[in-house]
Image: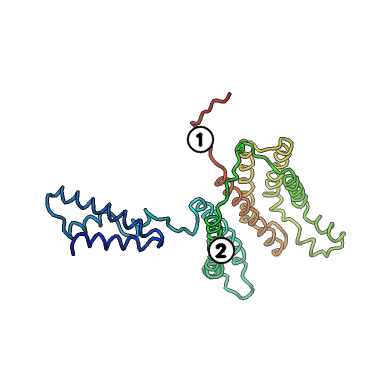
Amino acid sequence: MNPLDVIVAYVADVVRHLPRRERGDVALELQALLGEALERKAQEEARPADAAMAIALVRAFGEPAEVASRYGTVPTIIAPADARRFVRLTWIGLAVIWSLGLLASVQPPPGAPSDPLSLLATWWLRVVVPSLWWPGVLVAWFAAANLADRRRPRASTWKPRDARSGRVARGGLVLAMIGIVAGLAILAEPRLVLDLALGGRAAPEAYLALTWTDTFLQRQAFVLFLLVASSLPLFAHVLVQGHWTPRLRRVQDALALLTCAAMVWTVLDGPALATSAGDEAFKGGLVLIAIVTLAELAWRSWRLPRSPGGLRMRTS
């Protein structure tokens, strides 16, 4: 095989990875480029070019598939600009699915094995493995969006905004404050729910199911009430001011983390309600609230940009 045949064979392998409409132009360009490179190499070594020299040249140039990626547009399932958002949504969705599945697994039906190893195996086989449908759905969604953007490019609609403004939806903030007040009322006297729902005609067993234990009232109740109530003046200040500041966000995050810690303490530190069924439901709700809160904190810390410290701009 002469050196020209080596180059022709190499170029053929390269363009095989490209769309048909691009193969002719790339083949001519690449063959001329490698031919000139082979001539220079023969002059440097002061000997005629042969097949061995040509093979060494093309091997140094790169694998055919790699070289083809330099010339053509490599098809992508997920656009590079969406890669971080895809990973973020994947892990958030899996964390929620796994956490909810774990809560369901630790309460096996009657007659099912309840030892930790059996519960872990059940959680793995019935929750973790089937949960892979979530990344699959995201891949299909992002792939469809990427294909649509490539076929019908959209004009940019970007508009500048003040990243420091932290504008809030006042309606949502008012609803959050109403929810906090309702939670405080339930925390102070959960039997009020029965009185409001049934007009005081509930069975004694129902009232017993919503009765706090003395241990909970002496240990966690005051801490939880204080932490939850502390959010009311914070939200009221933001409601009047109309936006979040970095300092207020840090205060909110600190309160959220302390509240999650108090919830975990409550879950791990003995019964909070007088009956086991009510206690399990209450603690399951606490775990769910803690998971959602931590997920929201992680999402916000990932989503918000960090200001470059060294940037200085002079404005007139």
Q: Is residue 26 left or right of residue 295?
A: left
| Residue located beneath label 1 in the image | 308
The residue lying toward the viewer, choosing from 304 and 98, is 304
Real-space Cα separation, disc 2 to disc 1, in angstroms: 36 Å
The quarter of the rendered structure image containing the N terminus is bottom left
The residue lying toward the viewer, choosing from 284 and 191, is 284
Kind of residue sitting beneath label 2: Val
Kind of residue sitting beneath label 1: Pro
* Whether residue 197 is situated above or below residue 171 in the rendered picture: below
The residue lying toward the viewer, choosing from 292 and 142, is 142
The quarter of the rendered structure image containing the C terminus is top right
- Mark 1 lies on a secondary structure that is loop
The residue lying toward the viewer, choosing from 10 and 166, is 10
**Residue 241 lies in quadrant:** top right
Q: Counting other residues with Cα less than 10 Å from the Cα at mark 2, is it few (<14), some (14-19), or many (20 or more)? A: few
| Residue located beneath label 2 in the image | 137
* Whether residue 96 is situated above or below residue 224 in the rendered picture: below
Q: Counting other residues with Cα less than 10 Å from the Cα at mark 1, is it few (<14), some (14-19), or many (20 or more)? A: few
Residue 47 pos. (x, y %): 12, 52
Residue 157 pos. (x, y %): 60, 45
